Structure formats: C-alpha cells, structure tokens
Amino acid sequence: MKRLTFLALLVVLYSGFASGEKPFTALAYVLVAIPSLAVLITFAMPGGLTPRREDIHAYYFERSDRATLTNVLPWSSLLALAVALEVVGLALGGRNKTVPTLSTAVDHLLVTREGRWLLYVTWLSVGIAPVLRLWHRQRTARI
C-alpha cells in the first residue's frame, strides 16, 4: 500500500511539473518520453513482452476467458460511434466553435495548466495500471 501511495504521489507531482512546461517544446517531448520509456521498461523487465512466459500468458488468458463478442459489442459500438462523430465533426468544419469535436473539447482542457495536469494524471494512470496489475499477479503467483 505504501508503494501504491508513493506511486500515486509521484504521478501527481510529475504531472504538476510536466503540465507547467510550454507544449511542443523539446523539454515537453522529453517529459512525455520519460514516463513512456519507464512504463515500457518496467513492463518488459518481468518478461511482459515475451509470449513464452506461462504466468503472463495464463493471466491474460484468464482475464479474457469471459470475453465474448456479446460482452464486447457495447464498448466496441461506443468506440466506433465516438470515432465516427469525430470524423464527421472534422469533415464538417474541423476546429471551429460551431462544430464541436472531441479534439476541440480536449483543446479547451489544454489551454489551462490545471486541464493539462488533469490529462497528464489520467494518461500516466492509464499507462501504469497494466504494469501494476501484472506485477500484482506475478507477486501473488509466487506466494
């Protein structure tokens, strides 16, 4: 629990620092690359990228065992609808105030530092979650 709290604090502090940097600068790109590489490396360290590891294979096989086309269809339909609305919105006028798209909504969040911080925390949390689940699975398998 202490590690999870420390990791959450690290995500919040890193996001606060990174969101203060001006977008599209060299430092901003480096601040995006650092957590991306860190998550990739920590995922690969326990063998997460090798399909021959039985424990990792068993974990994902067990998690996907209950997934059927019927279970996945509502989420797939929602994703397809979101993509279609974005494409239609961009085709009808792109980035203007009369035709809202998901990208214009995100643009409004990116204007303020608080909005960038919120998106950064979300992005880092989504990226870290699979690694934490994999580590937890491997740790409980050893016990």
Image (spheres, helix red, strand yellow):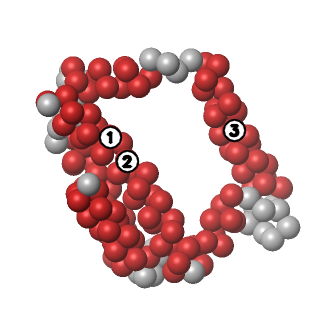
Residue 27, horizontal then vertical, whole percent: 34, 76
Residue drawn 73% across the image and 40% down it: 81
Instruction: Note whether 48 is above or below 12 in the view shown.
Output: above
Tag 2: amino acid:
Ala
Q: Quadrant of residue 115?
A: bottom right
Residue drawn 29% across the image and 20% down it: 58
The residue identified by callout 1 is: 133
Residue 143, horizontal then vertical, whole percent: 14, 31
Tag 3: amino acid:
Leu
| Nearer the camera: disc 1 or disc 3 | 1
Task: Please state if 66 lies on the left or on the right of 94 as rendered.
Answer: left
Crowding at dot 1, Cα within 10 Å, few <14 / some 14-19 / many 20+, comes out as few
The residue identified by callout 3 is: 78
* Comes first in the chain, label 1 or label 3: 3
Task: Please state if 111 lies on the left or on the right of 37 as rendered.
Answer: right
Report, in whole angstroms, how far the alpha carbon at label 1 lies from the one at label 3.
Answer: 25 Å
